[in-house]
Image (cartoon, rainbow, N blue to C red):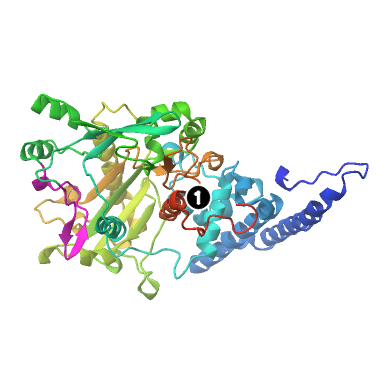
Amino acid sequence: MRAASKVILSWPAKGLLPWLPAFLFALPLCALAGALVGVRQRLHSRYRSLVDRADGDASDDIRRLFICLDLGVTVMKGVFEDGVIRNGFDVINDIDFRQWLINHGGDEELCVDSAPVRGFYDLVFAFEGGDFGKPNIEAGTLLRAMARIGLAYKGGIMFKMQAGMGDTVFTPLYQALLARGVKFKFFHKVEELVPDGRQIGSIRMTQQVALKGEDYAPLVDVKDLACWPSTPNYGQIDPAQAALLQAHDVNLESYWSDWPKLYHQQFDKELPVLTLKRGVDFDQVVFGISVGSLKALCPQLLAQSPALNTTYEQVQTVATQAYQVWLDKDLKQMGWDYQPDGQQPVLSGFSEPYDTWAPMDQLLCREAWLAPLDPRNVSYFCSALPVASYPPASDSGFPARMTALAKAGAVEQLSKRIASLWSAAGPAGAFPWQWLVDGSEATGVARFDSQYWRANVDPSERYVMSVVNSTKYRLQTDQSGFSNLYLTGDWIKTGLNAGCVEAAVMAGMQTSRAMSGHPAVIEGETDFLGRS
């Protein structure tokens, strides 16, 4: 039994009275935990063998039922025994969720390594350094997320967007802010936040490109939908600089970009530097960049704020990878028949290197394809990306090496493993590359070159993890240690404390409340039960 649920009584009776409420509260929970142990033992003794004996569909049904029972009983035993009801989910954040299940007697195959558990680890990229042999997530944080997803969803556990995320979420926000008079300055790279005592005194920035006009219009229309393009609108950039950017395929958003070097070689001068000053250009600063960028952008702040420095050290991030393929077959023709009520799957727990798959056919109507090439399916895959260490900013070839690694993993999966999902794809090594919508004369694996793949390795791109014992080091928006600096993003302490859109929105609301007093209440900021 963990310390959180222990009650220690001392004699003589002096001081006994204050302990009685806790004792009376803990006793029935411990009794329930004990009863659940008996239930699980009875379950295993009578029915465990059926999982191994049954054949075909019956075997799957029995196994899935047994998984639900063993996982459910084990979780409830742990919740009762470890004081989660009294103290909140964070009380068990000192242990990894899988180890917590093991400690409470969960069956290794049908609980600890079960599909629901594996799926949740995959969905939140819970692997240190992207190493699939190092699963790591706080038991309390994951259990809270599982409870909210399983018990508090409205309408559906997951929703699929009807266009790209940037276009369905960020385009309307950008347009609304623009209409309210907010000024956007694109192509300005933050170099450092510089403290002045306990405030942010200045912000150093680099102006990456010169514009042809005064303002930059970033959006492009695709079938009457305002979208964010994958590359800058070069027609709005100084022609000489635009030509150089395109000639070298420069990614201005990359931490490892060699653009400053190329610019200096071409124009024999450094990129312009801009310094914003407190009281002149700003009063307050909202830092919405991810925790992975703190060391690069805030070294002096980390030196002055032990709390902020500890957050940077303890709240880890992980690189991710993704690929997308467009096919001239629909799901049924690919061999995936299970679509209840026409719903397509969101699947996790698949084999590495890409463990999560979602067909996103609802997006095809948003894409501008020429009639002969109209795809019938577009499938998205993603997972963590193993990266042992990150080189200095001067290693401009690093992103390309990681992108090549992501591509190799995608090709390997399609070549050797995809038949487990798409049975019509044939045996391993026989993937029908002609399924891929290409539009060129390419044959075989070369047709993959027209698809999409990506490695997310930049400090601001990496996924924010919830590794064991990290939540207690997360800061709320106004706890940076600097009076005019507000932190926001899914890496701050929100009550959800996990990398997701919901946590990012909650963080933004928290920042708004700290600055303006609104909103007074943020749903999900406190636990279902126990302390927040």
Q: Is residue 219 magenta?
A: yes
Residue shown at the point (55%, 62%) measured from the top left: 63
Q: Is residue 343 above or below residue 505?
A: below
Query: Residue at the location (32% across, 65% down)?
Result: 335
**Residue 443: x percent and y percent?**
14, 51
SS label for mark 1: loop
Along the line of sight, the residue nearer the viewer: 526 or 184: 184
Specify start and end residues of the magenta stretch as a single range.
215-237
Which residue lies most toward the bottom here?
341
Q: Position of residue 182 (x, y in %)?
A: 27, 52
Task: Tell me if residue 435 can be seen.
Answer: yes
In this figure, which residue is indicated by the disc labeled 1?
494
Residue 292 in the figure: left or right of residue 373: right
Seen at 53% across and 55% down, the residue is 525
Q: Is residue 410 left or right of residue 19?
A: left
Q: What type is the residue that disc 1 sits on?
A: Thr
The image quarter containing residue 187 is top left
106 to 396, vertically: above or below: below
Q: In which quarter of the view is residue 347 placed?
A: bottom left
Q: Main secondary structure of the magenta part?
A: loop
Give the total of numbered labels: 1
For residue 475, side relative to residue 282 (left or right): right
**Which residue is at the far front?**
279
Residue 159, picture quadrant: bottom left
Where residue 211 appears, x then y in whole percent? 12, 42
Q: Nearer the viewer, residue 478 or 317?
A: 478
Q: Depth check: give the residue in front, 348 or 329.
A: 348
- In the rendered image, residue 60, in percent from the top left (x then y), is placed at 51, 64
Is 17 included in the stretch rendered in magenta?
no
Q: Which of 216/137 is in front?
A: 216
- Within 10 Å of the Cα at label 1, are there few (<14), some (14-19), or many (20+) other Cα atoms? many
